[in-house]
Every structure is written in structure tokens, then in C-alpha cells.
Image: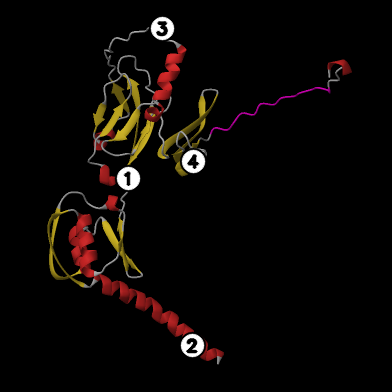
Amino acid sequence: MFKKYGILLWLLCLFMPGVYAQEALSVLQRPITISVDSSSVENIIDRLVIENDLYFSYNPQILPTGLHSCHAEKMPLKNVLRKLLPGSDYQFEVIDNQIIIKRLEREPLRVSAQVIDRKSRDPVPYASVTIEGQSIGTITNSDGRFDLVIPQRLLDHDILIGCLGYVEFRIAPDSLKSVSQIDLKPVSYRLREVRVKPVEPEEIIARFRAHITDNYTLTPQLMTTFYRETVKQDGEYMGMWEAVMEMLKSPYRGVASDKVRFVKGRKSEFSNSYKDVKLKIQGAPIILPSSTW
């Protein structure tokens, strides 16, 4: 009897992968009829979902931008999707009758350089290095150096390098590959006249209280923060740690504490070994007169 059930279980395990494969094949081979002009890819996918009872899972940020047209008459779903999402950049996976859209990430471009003052030739620390129109970027360290990883899909965006007191520098990623040093031109700004007059402390406090709702939020705020820590010994870097974190800031009148969540991080520990410092401490208990207790 046990042998009989064992054979049935073996046949079931052998049969199930074929069922899932057929299910994936049947969904992607389903004939689709659609006609859409000048619409976003996300809207076209929504149209497919509504008219054909399909289920998709994807990140909207990975979809192509701009307006597209899609016309098909009883065409397999896979071919319809390939007209919108090229096979060189996207792949599809079917799990439990749900179509998952993934973007194929090619090897990113890694660039590094040093930012210096054009006149003094000194390093420019803490200058911002960002990809134009994106939230991806970094800052230079105390020596003016930076490393930036640029995804392949953003290679057509310029790199912007700026710092307070300097003219913003713009360069294409391909040009940055062959550049080891970037000169920032100093610039002076004319500020408006500032008048200083004595003010009573009570007036300052009154103004502060009147603008609490303007200067402090009354609702929780989710902020993205950047953390960097470096360790130096005898002028040489021993290690560097960086992290991106999210902070949930409590409102001004809230009683809850702020919360911090680690998103991602990286570290560089150099081969230099720490130099030990040996200390010898001698001492004994100090007995104080009872009158001083």
C-alpha cells in the first residue's frame, strides 16, 4: 500500500511542473485584441487588465516614458507586451496566473574624480554630485573625491556638480569616464542689505509662537537621510561607512519618538592596520576623611 501511494506521489510531483509551465504558456499565449493611440505604457497595461481579466505586477518607474500606440488583433499577449517592452530590456515571469514584469539591469557605469577650486587648486569638500532630474547622487569627501554609480538607463542624463560659492559644472557621463579632476569656478553673489536693530526678547518670543504652525509641521513627515562616517589615523584613511536611512519625524505636538529605518549602506575598509596604543595606568583607592563625606 505504501508503495502504491509512493508511486502516486511521484507521478504528482512529475506532473505539477508541467501544469505550471502550461499555465504560464497559456497566459502569455492568450489572444489579445487592443487598439490604443498616444497613451502611456502604464495606461495600456491597465487597459489590458480591464478588458482581458489579466493580473500584472511591476514597478511603474521601470516602464518606458512618453506616449505609445498599441494595435493588435488576436495577437498572443507575449507579442503585444514585446511591442511595448523590448526583450533586450524586459522579461516576463508568470506565477500563479500573475504576470511579473522585470527590467533587465545592465552593468552600471562607475565613475570617480576629484573636485578642486580652479584658482587655489585646493579640494572642494562636500560638493554635491547628482544625476540631472533624478534622486541619485553623492557628495565629495574631505579630499574632494567622489565615486558615483550611474545606471545604464540614465546614461543620457548629465551629471551636475555644484557647491555653494561656485558655478555649477555640467558634464556627460561618457565624458566623465576620462576625467580625473574637475575644476569649479568660484563665484561671488551680491546680497541684499541687512539692517540690524535692537529687539526686545519678549517680541522675539511672541513672533516665534505666532509662527509655530508655519515653521514646524503638525503632521508626521517621512524624510530620507544620508550618513557618512570616516576614520583617520595619522592622516591616513582607515575606513569609510555610508548609509541611506529613512526617518519618520514626529509632529511638533506629537508625543511619539522619531523612528529611523536603515535602507541600504556600503563600507570601505582599507588595508591599513590600526596602530595600537599601549597605556599603563597605576593607582590606588582614595580614602577621604569622614568629615568630607
Furthest residue toward bottom: 1
Task: State which tag comes first along the sequence, 2 or 3.
Answer: 2
Residue 133 appears anywhere in the view: yes
Residue drawn at (30%, 14%), measured in percent from left and top?
Answer: 119
Q: Please tell me which residue is depicted at 40% across the width and 24% down the height of the picture.
A: 210
Q: Which mark is residue 260?
A: 4
Residue indicated by mark 3: 198
- State the CA–CA distance, disc 4 to disc 1: 29 Å
Q: Determine whether label 4 and label 1 are within 8 Å by CB.
A: no
Q: Which mark is residue 108?
A: 1
By secondary structure, the bulk of the magenta-drawn segment is best described as loop
What residue type is disc 4 on?
Answer: Val
- For the N terminus, which image quadrant? bottom right
Question: Does the image show residue 143?
Answer: no
The front one of 133 and 125 is: 133
> Is residue 278 highlighted in magenta?
yes
Separation (CA) of disc 1 from disc 2: 50 Å
Along the polypeptide, which appears first: circle 1 or circle 3? 1
Mark 1, Cα crowd under 10 Å, few <14 / some 14-19 / many 20+, is some
Crowd around label 3: few <14 · some 14–19 · many ≥20 (10 Å): few
Which quarter of the figure has residue 249? top left
Indicate which disc, 4 or 3, sits on the residue closer to the N terminus.
3
